């Protein structure tokens, strides 16, 4: 997994709550058997009209947000389907950080497993960041996982909390499967302990 | 001895390794696999030269992509066909049992697990699908996972998990006539919201839950994720044991299993981190009006006004949902006309759902404007329904009677809504575009969907005039 230590990037504001994974990557793009190449389909129905033209009013189609790598969104981001394609699409598009008041559980795990940092901030700070991103041209944030801190050069600064295990995995780009396979003897011991459950 | 909840018992019984920070490596007793979320996981195994650690605890089927029309083994969409073919090859190469498209036991993964007796009390069950919470109806700890986690379970038969908080939802009293398990689920989500249980494992308790059949319990647990909870569960009882006994993969030594299963309930003094109490008698048949399952009102209700929303966030979300759904504030739900009706999905496509629906449909005909389809959850459900003559009732009433699969719940196969079409659906998600781009989904119970199919608009099933079966 690609490690995450710190990142500075352009911020795109998406002021909607409960953005579900069906919106992040619609079903017609789930039939592929690869992990890559989903970025062009990210937010497909919001980004493009029925006949495939970019919608000028959608944030990612606006020139000032070209190359955005940090997304600010409303609460309950990533709810719904467990499709990891949502995390793949966000990463493949170029997002490295999503900042929201809350995230759905399965999405949060998927994001973590793909080196995508999720930052939880209170609604009020989200609201400030949405305003800044909407009003200040080429608004950038600096996100440090080392310091657990988000800041801009306009005076905004906030600390965030993150699960320590997740933080370590992200900082070091650790592969969970590799970690687990080190516990093989414990897994084998567990299996012999439960052999009497083979009814 | 410390009093424990059912969840805590299931959790502790599956710990392989406990980290001091609270994370645990859990053993997984059953891994269900389907074509959409597994190809990249198997590919990962190949790249890392790993095998499936316990193919005997891994079961696969095809459900999301499969057509529901006759001759469906010919799949016209080449990308879908490739995905299904990939699952076949992966199951063959890694020694995993597959219930393929032509199997008499094929079906939606959350329908066939219970049906085959694979889903049992006390198990940990995962699947790369968020509706895995369904299996919690048996007193199992069951939750949906992403593809990286699918790969992790294939490789190690284990999963790292941070312990969720516990929530009990106590549904007391008795469900009134016309309200179903689906209405319990929608009623709960309407009350706590689509993220009301994020971070929790839910245990459903109370007299109204006890009174449900296994099919009804599966419907309730299925929708846990729509309230944000990865897992929802119900302690097993005689209803559970009766359902499992005699099924193909049920325990050979059933009495031994039973002795363990009977210990799987929350202790009287067990404490939950949160408690929600619902009076079943106050529940009604519900219809969603918006673009998430928490946007719901009773059938006697009206489309809400964004201006009466409690917060600015809610006002914006309501206004946006009404725009997408093309609804005006104040419209009576019963005045909303439908174009399509979908009876199916892992929420509501089991035999009991079809029986209740056929009962209502008997002697009526689908409204001329409406296209209605019934998609049984599995081949076994389909055959059971056909042996009871339910297919004849549906066909005579003008419903399309299909082969089993996920179908129009998420429209990965050819069953989709056209832009602007409005659908009464027994599925679980009314997200924008879920059933087809520009499609408008209203979630309802199976009887409510059937009633809408016949009258052409949402209709209170409590007023329904049932017709008697004609004697042959």
Image (cartoon, rainbow, N blue to C red):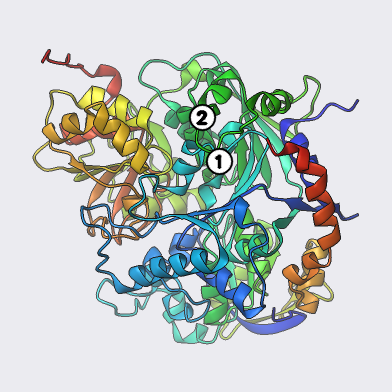
Q: Which residue lies furthest to the front in this view?
A: B252
Q: Which residue is found at the position 83% from the left and 62% from the top?
A: A183
Residue B22 visible (yes or no)? no
Q: Which residue is found at the position 50% from the left and 42% from the top?
A: B113
**Chain letter of the residue carrying label 1:** B
Task: Judge by depth and name the residue closer to the eye, A121 or B75.
Answer: B75
Report the side of B16 relative to A89 (left or right): right
Quadrant of the rendered image containing residue B433:
bottom left
Q: Name the residue under label 2.
A: B217
Helix, strand or loop at mark 1 = loop
Q: Which residue is found at the position 74% from the left and 79% from the top?
A: A4
Q: Which residue is found at the position 27% from the left and 52% from the top?
A: B68
**Chain letter of the residue carrying label 2:** B
Q: In this view, does B330 lie above or below A111?
A: above
State which tag comes first along the sequence, 2 or 1: 1
Task: Judge by depth and name the residue closer to the eye, A106 or B32.
Answer: B32
Q: Where residue B3 sits: x, y (%)?
A: 84, 26
Residue B267 visible (yes or no)? yes
Q: Where residue A56 sits: x, y (%)?
A: 36, 78
Q: Quadrant of the C terminus of chain B?
A: top left
Q: Distance between the residues labelled 2 and 1?
A: 17 Å
Q: In this view, does B380 lie above or below B1?
A: below
> Marks 2 and 1: same chain?
yes
Task: Judge by depth and name the residue closer to the eye, B331 or B340.
Answer: B340
Q: Mark 1 points at which residue?
A: B118
Report the side of A14 relative to B369 (left or right): right
Q: Where residue B261 sits: x, y (%)?
A: 69, 27
Within 10 Å of disc 2 (Cα), the crowding (few <14, some 14-19, many 20+) is many
């Amino acid at each position: 997994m690609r490690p995450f230590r710190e990142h500075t990037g352009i911020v795109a504001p998406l002021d909607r709550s409960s953005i579900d994974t069906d919106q992040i990557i619609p079903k017609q793009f789930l039939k592929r058997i690869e992990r890559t190449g989903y970025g062009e389909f990210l937010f497909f129905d919001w980004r493009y009209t029925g006949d495939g033209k970019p919608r000028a009013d959608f944030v990612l189609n606006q020139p000032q947000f070209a190359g955005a790598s940090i997304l600010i969104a409303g609460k309950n981001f990533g709810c719904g389907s467990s499709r990891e394609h949502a995390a793949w699409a966000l990463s493949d598009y170029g997002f490295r950080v999503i900042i929201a008041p809350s995230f759905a559980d399965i999405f949060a795990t998927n994001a973590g497993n793909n080196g995508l940092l999720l930052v939880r901030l209170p609604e009020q700070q989200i609201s400030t960041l949405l305003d800044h991103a909407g009003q200040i041209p080429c608004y950038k944030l600096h996100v440090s996982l080392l310091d657990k801190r988000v800041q801009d050069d306009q005076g905004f600064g906030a600390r965030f909390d993150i699960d320590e295990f997740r933080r370590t995995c992200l900082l070091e780009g650790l592969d969970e499967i590799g970690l687990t396979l080190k516990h093989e003897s414990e897994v084998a011991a567990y299996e012999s302990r439960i052999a009497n459950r083979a009814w | 001895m410390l009093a424990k909840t059912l969840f805590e018992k299931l959790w502790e019984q599956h710990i392989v390794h406990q980290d001091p920070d609270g994370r645990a490596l859990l053993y997984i007793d059953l891994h269900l696999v389907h074509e959409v979320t597994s190809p990249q996981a198997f590919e990962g195994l190949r790249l890392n030269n790993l095998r499936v650690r316990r193919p005997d605890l891994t079961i696969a089927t095809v459900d999301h992509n499969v057509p529901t029309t006759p001759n469906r083994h010919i799949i016209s969409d080449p990308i879908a066909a490739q995905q299904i073919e990939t699952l076949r090859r992966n199951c063959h190469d890694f020694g995993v049992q597959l219930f393929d498209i032509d199997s008499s036991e094929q079906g939606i993964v959350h329908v066939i697990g219970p049906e085959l007796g694979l889903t049992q009390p006390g198990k940990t069950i995962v699947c790369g699908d968020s509706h895995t919470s369904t299996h919690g109806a048996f007193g199992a700890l069951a939750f949906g996972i992403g593809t990286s986690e699918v790969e992790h379970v294939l490789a190690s038969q284990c999963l790292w998990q941070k312990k969720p908080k516990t929530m009990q939802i106590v549904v007391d009293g008795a469900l009134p006539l016309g309200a179903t398990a689906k209405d319990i689920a929608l009623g709960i989500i309407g009350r706590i919201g689509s993220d009301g249980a994020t971070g929790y494992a839910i245990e459903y308790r109370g007299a109204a839950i006890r009174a449900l059949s296994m099919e009804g319990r599966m419907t309730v647990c299925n929708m846990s994720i729509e309230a944000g909870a990865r897992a929802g569960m119900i302690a097993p009882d005689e209803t559970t044991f009766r359902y499992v006994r005699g099924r193909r993969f049920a325990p050979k030594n059933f009495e031994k299993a039973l002795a363990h299963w009977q210990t799987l309930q929350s202790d009287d003094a067990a404490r939950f981190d949160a408690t929600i109490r619902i009076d079943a008698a106050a529940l009604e048949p519900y219809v969603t009006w918006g673009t998430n399952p928490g946007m719901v009102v009773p059938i006697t209700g009206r489309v809400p006004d964004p201006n009466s929303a409690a917060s600015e966030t809610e006002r914006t979300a309501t206004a946006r949902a009404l725009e997408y759904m093309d609804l005006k504030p104040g419209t009576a739900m019963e005045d909303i006309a439908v174009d399509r009706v979908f009876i199916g999905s892992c929420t509501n496509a089991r035999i009991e759902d079809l029986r209740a629906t056929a009962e209502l449909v008997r002697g009526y005909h689908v409204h001329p404007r409406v296209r209605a389809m019934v998609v049984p959850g599995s081949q076994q459900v389909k055959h059971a329904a056909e042996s009871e003559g339910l297919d004849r009732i549906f066909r005579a009433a003008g419903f399309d009677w299909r082969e089993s699969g996920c179908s129009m719940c998420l429209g990965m196969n050819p069953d989709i809504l056209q832009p602007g079409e409005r659908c009464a659906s027994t599925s679980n998600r009314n997200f924008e575009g879920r059933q087809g781009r520009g499609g408008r989904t209203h979630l309802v119970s199976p009887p409510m969907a059937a009633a809408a199919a016949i009258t052409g608009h949402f209709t209170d099933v409590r007023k329904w005039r049932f017709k008697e079966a004609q004697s042959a």
